[in-house]
Image: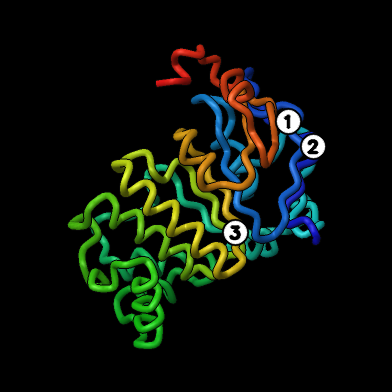
């Protein structure tokens, strides 16, 4: 199977701060991966590198065997349009209606005038399509709701629906469960994984909850101080302990 992403000896600095240091990772289409590690370990930076929001200070990133650095602006927009990014704050405009937030999933493929027209006069086929996606994410009845009236869990599902509407091959999720209770966190992870498996999407999620990461994700990548600590389908307690520098007592809690 061909690699969807290749990170080759990636080094990324912001001023005097090293965010990523000599990172080498290959990702195949359809893989389900959790990024784990302490705060400030480089997880968000890594996701933004995959989404071409950040360029490496040195090293090379390839997508489908093509170096991202070789793409012109039009090609880069097309590449990014197929990579859905769910930021920690979900990237939702709360004073817009749910269907309008979902329409934003294709903002990079439309002119400003065309997007504005869709916002004001949404074509019926688009609304039907969005309604079906919302059915899949469990909030079909919220199609015309103002997003600010939704619960945190429902807003997360709007962000997932936007990714599906985007027709991406990859979903990058940056701590999407940080603001909800454990039951809703499990539900959202299960939804994202089910959708990814159904559509052969690649899912890469940064997550702080180690137990959920180990339970749901077949591949775990551990980062610490910008360095790759492990990339494994079988992570041991000792590796987790070293990653977070936890004592045996803390691990047992």
User: Which labelled disc corresponds to residue 99?
Assistant: none
Q: Residue at x 70, y 63 (%)?
A: 75
Q: Secondary structure at mark 1?
A: strand
Q: Position of residue 122 (x, y in %)?
A: 33, 80
Q: Secondary structure at mark 2?
A: strand
Residue 211 higher or lower than 53, as above or below:
above
Residue 23 higher or lower than 89, as above or below:
above
Q: Position of residue 59 (x, y in %)?
A: 79, 37
Distance from label 2 to label 3 (Cα)? Answer: 22 Å
Q: Quadrant of residue 13?
A: top right
Left/right placement of residue 80 relative to residue 121 reads right
Q: Residue at x 69, y 31 (%)?
A: 230
Q: Position of residue 179 (x, y in %)?
A: 32, 40
Residue 52 higher or lower than 163, as above or below:
above
Q: Earlier in the sequence, mark 2 or mark 1?
A: 1
Say if mark 2 contacts mark 3, CB within 8 Å.
no
Left/right placement of residue 70 relative to residue 37 reads right
Distance from label 2 to label 1 (Cα)? Answer: 6 Å
User: Which labelled disc corresponds to residue 59?
Assistant: 2
The answer to whether residue 12 is seen in the rendering is yes
Q: Residue at x 51, y 53 (%)?
A: 85
Q: Earlier in the sequence, mark 3 or mark 1?
A: 1
> Which residue is tagged 3?
170
């Amino acid at each position: 199977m061909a690699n969807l992403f290749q990170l080759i000896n990636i080094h990324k600095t912001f001023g005097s701060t090293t965010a990523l240091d000599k990172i080498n990772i290959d990702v195949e289409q359809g893989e389900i991966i959790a990024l784990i590690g302490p705060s400030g370990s480089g997880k968000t930076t890594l996701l933004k590198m995959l989404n071409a929001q950040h360029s490496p200070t040195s090293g090379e990133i390839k997508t489908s065997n093509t170096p991202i650095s070789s793409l012109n602006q039009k090609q880069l927009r097309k590449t990014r349009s197929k990579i859905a990014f769910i930021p920690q704050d979900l990237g939702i405009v709360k004073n817009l209606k749910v269907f309008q937030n979902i329409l934003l999933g294709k903002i990079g493929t439309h002119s400003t005038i065309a997007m504005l027209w869709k916002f004001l006069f949404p074509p019926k086929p688009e609304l039907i399509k969005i309604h079906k996606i919302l059915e899949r994410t469990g909030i079909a009845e919220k199609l015309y709701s103002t997003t600010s009236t939704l619960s945190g869990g429902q807003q997360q599902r709007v962000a997932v629906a936007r990714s599906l509407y985007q027709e991406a091959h990859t979903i990058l999720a940056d701590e999407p469960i940080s603001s909800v209770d454990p039951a809703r966190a499990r539900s959202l992870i299960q939804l994202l994984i089910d959708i990814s498996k159904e559509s052969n999407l690649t899912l890469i999620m940064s997550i702080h909850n180690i137990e959920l990461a180990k339970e749901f994700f077949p591949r775990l990548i551990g980062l610490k101080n910008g360095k790759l600590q492990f990339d494994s389908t079988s992570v041991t307690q000792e590796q987790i302990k070293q990653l977070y520098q936890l004592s045996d007592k803390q691990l047992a809690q």
